[in-house]
Image (cartoon, grey):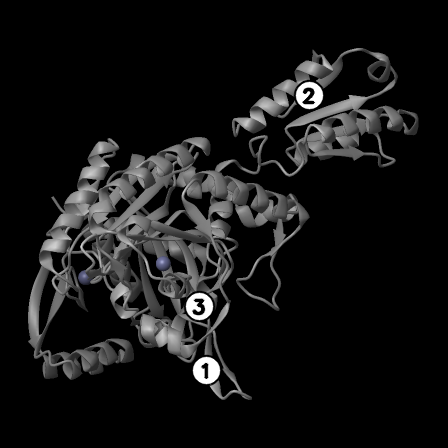
């Protein structure tokens, strides 16, 4: 049986075959498998293509699939391959083959399906009968620069969705339709949470209501992602290039950093894309005894990363971000306990947000690694033991770890079944060495600590984007920017509203009075759109009554409750993060 990825990539070939039948002059660039299907970047040589034609391509593909065609592999030596690309008048394939030649390749492989041959490394399905005819669908068209470089020609990217079965495809389409309804970029606008501006692409502006969400989240982070034994610090945003040279970022990560030159001092500076190097400097400030470890430094200040414009997306792909970041400086014998505690925190945190832990990956020692094999073995054994102790199922990505340490990644499933990667726990044997960090052992010898990089929510911006969609904007009470909305029927009821509002505010509840001169019906509709958890309409009857008349979010009917019970209900819910 072929893997889904193989089927997806094979479909990219079939799509190219269909395109070449319909537009013989089209030039093909690349056609990989992706998370939900496949795409092919194609130069239509001036012809424009529309959604109707996309449907026709799909029909042709279905036709090809049903013919039970075989994928056959052939090889050409590199010169023959170049001649082939020139004969095809395909500059993209020619460039790819030239690059392979430059890298020293002497032969390249081709795959033929039906009448269509394409340069490819494989693998593919053996026969198109392995692909179910209605398990795929051409999805959309987009522009994409050749090799992702805006200096190059803009090609047309044809996206296809593909799954093992039609049922899985339908399930996915249903999920995407639901996702569109709860797009956090739209909800962010509708609920006045944040805005973006062309003058700061990828750097969200948090509006007052979004700021409340962020502040509540930060309070939560301080209690549960950090908590006892964590020390929050604040380090500079702009740091001398010398620091980034020590940490290795200058050499390996500079493209992703915003850098500047200080003319007066004639020095290069880097805006921090992560906190680690600054935390190394804090550790280095003092002498540490083995008894002081683990030392946990935490920081949530804003980081800046130079993400490509084309990849920016609302809050989930940004250039300015903050994390529930921490660096734990530990002795090797403390790894197990630290990881166990972190896994417990992860379980607790995701439970609060009703996010289901979906997949955990443990990435282990790669072929080229830093440090002692025995240290790695011990650390990996600790990570496995901690995962087992926490009763968490995990996959091992053998050899997939970074060269400086093994890693645990946690993916969750949201309310509509989408997967998000959130927590990362990364062991690091390298950074402490680069910074020559030491602590004193019981016998007086100097030892190098291990550093654990950890973020459990990940980036706060991204996490907010995820939960806005997860809750479809209807946040649990504790997170809701406005928790109670009071609606006055007429001006004369404002004092009664004000009195109740004061009582609620005194109990720490966020309350808003809608005193606009509109009909009650309008005000109710507005409060429903704002997804406020509780709404109370105050008119003559309500102002005089002992009991409150409350409308719960989503409920058609109102209910009566005493002031005392209402306050208790709300404060209990808030206390319990519900
Ligand atoms: Zn291929
Ligand atoms: Zn770090």
218 or 90: which is nearer to us?
Answer: 218
Q: Residues within 10 Å of mark 3 (few under 14, many from 20)?
A: few
Of residues 107 and 479, the one nearer the viewer is 479
Do the CB atoms of the residues marked 3 and 2 lie less than 8 Å apart?
no
**What's the residue at 27%, 62% (across, down)?**
438
Q: Residues within 10 Å of mark 1 (few under 14, many from 20)?
A: some
Distance of label 3 from label 2 (alpha carbons): 46 Å
Could you say which quadrant of the image residue 536 lies in? top right
Give the residue number, with chain letter if any, for mark 3: 308
**Which residue is labeled 2 in the image?**
551
> Which quadrant does ligand 2 occupy?
bottom left
The reply to whether residue 383 is in sight is yes
| Sooner in the amino-acid sequence: mark 3 or mark 2 | 3
User: Does 269 appear above or below 432?
Assistant: below
Report, in whole angstroms, how far the alpha carbon at label 1 lies from the one at label 2: 59 Å
Residue 22, image x and y in percent? 32, 64
Whichever of labels 1 and 2 marks the residue nearer the N terminus, that label is 1
* Residue 508 percent coordinates (x, y): 67, 31
Q: Is residue 86 above or below residue 11?
A: below
Q: Residue at x 49, y 50 (%)?
A: 460
Q: Which residue is mark 1?
A: 268
Residue 446 horizontal side relative to residue 80, left or right: right
Q: Depth check: give the residue in front, 246 or 518.
A: 246
Judge from the rendering whether residue 416 lies leftward or rightward of residue 201; answer left or right: left
Depth-wise, is mark 1 or mark 3 nearer the camera?
1
Q: Earlier in the sequence, mark 1 or mark 3?
A: 1
């Amino acid at each position: 049986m072929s893997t889904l990825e193989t089927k997806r990539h094979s479909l990219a070939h079939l799509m190219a075959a269909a395109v070449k039948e319909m537009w013989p002059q089209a030039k093909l660039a690349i056609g990989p498998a992706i998370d939900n299907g496949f795409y092919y970047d194609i130069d239509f040589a001036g012809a424009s293509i529309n959604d109707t034609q996309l449907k026709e391509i799909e029909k042709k593909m279905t036709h090809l699939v049903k013919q039970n065609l075989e994928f056959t592999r052939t090889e050409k030596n590199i010169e023959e391959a170049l001649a082939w690309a020139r004969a095809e008048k395909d500059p993209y394939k020619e460039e790819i083959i030239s690059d392979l030649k430059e890298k020293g390749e002497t032969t390249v492989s081709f795959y033929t399906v039906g009448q269509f041959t394409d340069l490819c490394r494989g693998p593919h399905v053996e026969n198109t009968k392995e692909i179910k005819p209605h398990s795929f669908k051409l999805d959309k068209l987009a522009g994409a620069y050749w090799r992702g470089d805006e200096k190059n020609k803009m090609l047309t990217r044809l996206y296809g969705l593909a799954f093992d079965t039609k049922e899985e495809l339908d399930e996915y389409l249903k999920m995407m339709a639901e996702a569109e309804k709860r797009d956090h970029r739209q909800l962010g606008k509708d609920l006045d949470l944040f805005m973006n501006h062309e003058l700061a692409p990828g750097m969200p502006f948090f509006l007052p209501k979004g700021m409340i969400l962020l502040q509540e989240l930060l309070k939560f982070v301080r209690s549960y992602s950090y908590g006892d034994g964590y020390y929050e610090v604040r380090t500079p945003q702009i740091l001398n290039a010398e620091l980034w040279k020590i940490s290795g970022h200058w050499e390996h990560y500079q493209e992703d950093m915003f850098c500047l030159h200080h003319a007066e001092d004639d020095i290069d500076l880097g805006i921090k894309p992560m906190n680690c190097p600054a935390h190394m400097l804090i550790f280095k400030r003092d002498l540490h005894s083995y008894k002081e470890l683990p030392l946990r430094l935490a920081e949530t200040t804003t980081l800046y990363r130079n993400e490509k414009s084309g990849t920016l997306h609302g809050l989930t792909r940004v250039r300015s971000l903050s994390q529930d970041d921490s660096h734990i400086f530990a002795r090797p014998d403390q790894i197990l306990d630290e990881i166990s505690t972190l896994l417990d925190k992860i379980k607790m945190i995701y439970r609060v947000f009703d996010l289901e832990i979906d997949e955990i990956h443990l990435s282990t020692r790669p072929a080229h690694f830093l440090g002692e094999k025995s240290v790695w073995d011990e650390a990996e054994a600790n990570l496995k033991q901690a995962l087992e102790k926490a009763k968490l199922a995990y996959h091992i990505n053998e050899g997939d770890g970074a060269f400086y340490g093994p890693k645990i990644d946690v993916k969750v499933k949201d309310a509509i079944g989408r997967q998000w990667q959130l927590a990362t726990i990364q062991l690091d044997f390298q950074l402490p060495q680069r910074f020559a960090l030491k602590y004193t052992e019981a016998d007086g010898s100097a030892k190098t600590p291990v550093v654990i990089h950890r973020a459990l929510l990940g980036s706060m911006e991204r996490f907010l984007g995820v939960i806005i969609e997860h809750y479809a904007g209807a946040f649990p009470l504790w997170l809701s920017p406005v928790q109670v909305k009071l609606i006055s029927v007429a001006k004369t009821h404002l004092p009664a509203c004000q009195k109740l509002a004061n009582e609620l505010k005194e109990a720490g509840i966020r309350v808003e009075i809608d005193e606009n001169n509109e009909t009650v019906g309008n005000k109710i509709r507005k409060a429903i759109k704002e997804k406020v958890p509780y709404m109370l309409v105050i008119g003559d009857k309500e102002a005089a009554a002992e009991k409150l008349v409350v409308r719960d979010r989503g409920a058609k009917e109102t209910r009566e409750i005493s002031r005392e019970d209402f306050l208790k209900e709300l404060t209990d819910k808030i206390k319990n993060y519900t």
